[in-house]
Image (cartoon, helix red, strand yellow):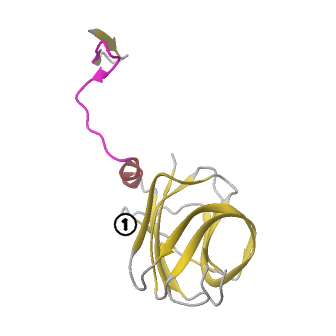
């Protein structure tokens, strides 16, 4: 068995299939980022005014990538929700204050985060995901292991397909190191 020795004298074994054998503690990336005050909840409710209206907008204004780790959403009517990559300048939204998941932490992501009943000024670049809210007043949960990665200067918007109905939503985000 091959041994690798680090600069501080720590040794790990490598077996004949090139697997490292060591005692370690691991944790999910989003938990690690939360211990560093880099994980937030974005919660809002609103009723988009018409079919095809954008009701959520997030633009990364910082230098580090922002990851959307999951989205929890419900609608008071059956509808489809489009999660879009967008460009342009958002008009008509109101700011959402991110809630740190590391309680008591003051850090906040460097981003423009808004919700509204009809956010305009945006051009759809493409649909990243869609959510089929097939039952009214039921929680639907989008969780993707790849996350939605929003680099500096890029933005996403959520769009309702149907013309009416209350949206209740929680968006989970983390900021890369």
Of 116 and 132, nearer the camera is 132
Pinpoint residue 16: horizontal percent, then vertical percent: 30, 12
Q: Which residue is mark 1?
A: 104
Q: Quadrant of residue 127?
A: bottom right
**What is the magenta segment's predominant secondary structure?**
loop
For the image shown, how many numbered marks are present on the structure? Answer: 1
- Magenta part of the chain: 12-28
Q: Dot 1 surroundings within 10 Å: few (below 14), some, or many (20 or more)? A: few
Looking at the picture, does residue 105 appear above or below residue 116?
Answer: above
Residue 55, percent across and down? 61, 79
Give yes or no for residue 101 being in the magenta stretch.
no
Residue found at the very far front of the displayed protein: 134
Above or below for 177 versus 155: above
Q: Is residue 17 magenta?
A: yes
Label 1: state its secondary structure.
Answer: loop
Q: What quarter of the picture does the N terminus occupy?
A: top left
Which residue, as the protein is rendered here, is positioned at the far top?
1
Q: Name the quadrant containing residue 119.
A: bottom right
Residue in the picture at 64% in, 90% down = 49
Q: Is residue 118 left or right of residue 176?
A: right
Tell me if residue 100 comes above or below residue 35 in the rendering: below
The residue lying toward the viewer, choosing from 104 and 47, is 47
Q: Answer with left or right where residue 46 lies relative to residue 141.
A: right
113 left or right of 69? right
In the rendering, at what x and y percent does residue 131 appear? 51, 70
Residue at 76% in and 70% down: 89
72 sits to left or right of 150: left
Residue 32's x, y, as percent?
Answer: 37, 48
């Amino acid at each position: 068995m091959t041994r690798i020795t680090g600069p501080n004298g720590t040794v790990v074994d490598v077996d004949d299939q090139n697997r490292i054998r060591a005692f370690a503690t691991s944790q999910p990336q989003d938990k690690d980022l939360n211990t560093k005050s880099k994980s937030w909840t974005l919660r809002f409710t609103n009723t988009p005014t018409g079919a095809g209206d954008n009701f959520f907008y997030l633009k990364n204004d910082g230098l580090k990538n922002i990851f959307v780790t999951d989205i929890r959403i419900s609608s008071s009517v059956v509808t489809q929700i489009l999660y879009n990559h967008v460009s342009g300048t958002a008009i008509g939204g109101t700011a959402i204050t991110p809630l740190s998941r590391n309680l008591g932490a003051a850090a906040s992501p460097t981003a423009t985060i808004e919700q509204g009943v009809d956010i305009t000024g945006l051009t759809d670049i493409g649909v990243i995901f869609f959510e089929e809210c097939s039952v009214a007043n039921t929680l639907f949960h989008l969780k993707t292991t790849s996350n939605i990665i929003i680099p500096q200067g890029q933005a996403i918007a959520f769009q309702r397909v149907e013309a009416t109905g209350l949206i209740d939503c929680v968006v989970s985000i983390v900021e890369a190191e």
